[in-house]
Image (spheres, rainbow, N blue to C red):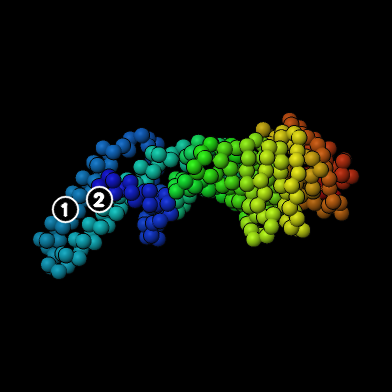
Amino acid sequence: MDIYQIKNLLEKYQRGACSSTEVKLIEDWLSGIKNDRPDHFDDKFIEDQLSVAQSRINAIIDQQAVFGPKKQYNWLAIAASILVVATVSVTIGILYLKKHQGNQLAAQPGVKQYISNGYVYIQTQKGITDHIKLPDGSFITLNSSSNLRYPVKFINHKRPVYLDEGEALFDVAKDKTSPFTVYTPKFATTALGTAFNIRSYAKEHKVSISLIHGKIRVDDLQHSAKPGATKILLPHQQIVLNKVSGLVVKSTFKDETLITAWKDGILSFQNATMDEVINSIQNRFNVTITNRSSRTDWSYTGTFKDESLNDVLKTVCLTEGISCTINQNSITLK
């Protein structure tokens, strides 16, 4: 197996086309290899390692030829060759992958990043946001308590990204030949070069897609055959899905900072529901909030920039006519 075959193996892995055995080998090595100097693993290094592998194969064959029965030699020599080459190839392949994808795998505290079956997975904890640069040059700002995944390599003129949970702001690199599509459990949002925000938390009763600039197409994945399942958004337009009633409403907004303020650590609410307010505070301050009050029908408006958790809770509770108790990171609304 030469250097080109190794690279083909990695490209096959990136496409998600490897067999289960190949995937297991690659991911076992990925989890076990630590490398602080990925720049060392150039083509010459790979060729040197292949020479080492070939020497090991020859040694095994020679040993079996001298000491083993002829029939056993044939099978063991073949098995040994495949095993050694596969092992070394996967090792070198992972080093090659790390060399070209190292920046995407370096996670800050509170952010989990890993590669599995050709996809990069990114998960943020409460109180943590992350900034991601995709292979095509697009940028994503990922909010707290969010899960995102995308292919290690975009192929076939498609750029799919999956926001499985949470909120993200997308600044898409222009490429008219390769549509950029963000998939959530209920929508597919496609753009050629634009910036838009998607909020899709499982704890909240709404899903919102807001266009900052450019143009996007939003396809309803739940009702794709129904009229109106596809909507075109222009700048400062948004659609909001009520997950309880199933109603999808298209509207406009004037101030985009109300949509994107979260990326700067600002809490901004405009007629927000109880779920939205509580979830946003939990994500911003890394706390757990339980609402035991009878007031659940909120329509809260307010903005908090540098205020402490206590100040935010005091203001919100005063407005909604409730009280709260704080026990370390646990808050109870009464």
In the figure, is residue 237 to the left or right of 115? Answer: right
In the figure, is residue 130 to the left or right of 327? Answer: left
- Classed neighbour count for the residue bearing mark 1: other residues with Cα under 10 Å, few (<14), some (14–19), many (≥20): some
The answer to whether residue 25 is above or below residue 254 is below
Instruction: Tell me the kind of residue under disc 2.
Output: Met
Residue at the far top in the pictured view = 306
- The answer, for residue 269, to whether it is visible in the render is yes
| Residue name at image x 17 percent, y 67 percent | 72
- The answer, for residue 31, to whether it is visible in the render is no
**CA distance for labels 1 and 2:** 14 Å
In the figure, is residue 299 to the left or right of 13? Answer: right
Q: Are marks 1 and 2 in contact (CB under 8 Å)?
A: no
- Classed neighbour count for the residue bearing mark 2: other residues with Cα under 10 Å, few (<14), some (14–19), many (≥20): few
Q: Which residue is mark 1?
A: 58
Residue at the far left in the pictured view = 66
| Residue name at image x 87 percent, y 41 percent | 319
In the rendered structure, which disc, 1 or 2, sits on the residue that comes first in sequence? 2
Judging depth in this view, the residue of 289 and 91 nearest the camera is 91
Q: Position of residue 241 (x, y in %)?
A: 72, 52
SS state under label 1: helix
Q: Residue 168's quadrant in the figure?
A: top right
| Residue name at image x 22 percent, y 57 percent | 81
Instruction: Tell me the kind of residue under disc 1.
Output: Asn
Judging depth in this view, the residue of 258 and 48 nearest the camera is 258
Q: Residue 76's quadrant in the figure?
A: bottom left
Q: Which residue is mark 2?
A: 1
Q: Position of residue 258 (x, y in %)?
A: 74, 36
Q: Position of residue 40 (x, y in %)?
A: 33, 35
Please name which of the two marks, 1 or 2, marks the residue nearer to the observer: 2
